[in-house]
Image (cartoon, helix red, strand yellow):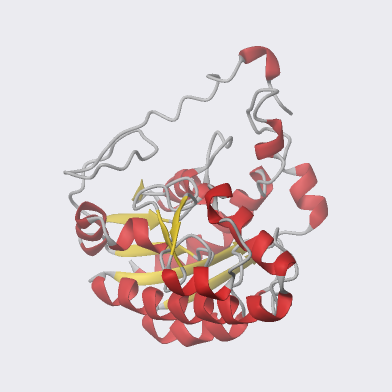
Amino acid sequence: MAYDHLGAGALDYLSCRYGKSKLLFRGPKRKLEGRYIAAIGGTETYGKFIPRPYPDRVEAALGTKVVNLGCVNAGIDVFSQDQAVMEACSGAAVTVIEVPGAQNMSNRFYAVHPRRNDRFLRASTLLKSFYREVDFTEFHFTRHLLSALRAADADRFQVVEHELKEAWVARMKALMSRIDSKVVLLWLAGHRPEDCTTCSDQDRDPLYVDRAMLEAVKPYAAQVVEVVVGPQDVAAGREGMIYSDLEAPAAEEMLGVQAHQAATEALAPVLKDLL
């Protein structure tokens, strides 16, 4: 349920920083020493509106410290460009990477904000020449941009989609190669990777990532854990989320509490074997 009477500040994320990073992570802040598991990813890993996200639940299940390094709307760039995050992951016994979408990263067609990867900064000369009829000053977010480009010309957008997919594979391989600890990829979504073969559904996070892409980066991981949450579980999972009236639209896009429990049950035995 939504505890609207508690207000927007009801869920205290205990924001903190690690090292010299400019990123704000969900707390409480943990010491990066001894044996620990690092978890990096986007909004689900951060646990927006979720009192106990899967990193907290995994820690309770295993009795091993889990450092939540998730960032809201994060893409690959925000982690790969942050030395403090890379050091924290390399110092961990295992690093869990929630599979990110392909839209929130800089590529040959456009640039995103280095820390808020969902923010569109500018179109490249290549994209401007490709879509001469589009006024790029109208866009502030990557999802809005891509939706508009697809609507303008679906055929031309296939070239953009292909670039995003190719860049995602290359960037993920580079990210995983830089992490010295064992890596577990976590697919946490409302659909299977093979169900995402086109860009026709802009709501299918992780956006544009399909089975072929996941298979391409699989050799860089110790394990791949797939958690698919059905519509009924998503709906039921809203019970226990904490958000205000203003936050309700954003909260409805989240997978919910049951998804975090499902992720915990899938991850715990895999992580236990790797520790």
Q: Horizontal and vertical percent for residue 50? A: 57, 37
Residue 256 lies left or right of residue 22; in this view the side is right
Q: Quadrant of the N terminus?
A: top right
Residue 159: percent from left, percent from top: 58, 82
Q: Residue at x 22, y 64 (%)?
A: 90
Residue 124 sits above or below residue 11 on the image: below
Q: Return the residue nearer the eye: 33 or 108.
A: 108
Q: Nearer the viewer, residue 25 or 39?
A: 25
Residue farthest to the right?
232
Decide if residue 102 is on the left or right side of residue 171.
right
In the picture, measured across the screen, residue 206 lies left or right of residue 179, that is right
184, 102: nearer the viewer: 102
162 w.r.t. 48: above or below? below
User: Who is closer to the viewer here, 205 or 235?
Assistant: 205
Vertical arrangement, residue 10 with respect to residue 58, above or below: above
Q: Is residue 19 visible?
A: yes
* Quarter in which the C terminus is drawn: bottom left
Tell me which residue sits at (70%, 77%) in the image. Answer: 198
Kindly indicate the quadrant of the structure image that contains residue 15.
Answer: top left
Question: Can residue 189 be spotted in the picture?
Answer: no
Which percent across, then down, holds residue 236? Answer: 78, 43
Q: Which quadrant of the structure image shows residue 13? A: top left
Residue at 53%, 38% in the rendered image: 52
Give x and y (percent) for residue 130.
56, 75
Residue 155 is left or right of residue 55, and the answer is right
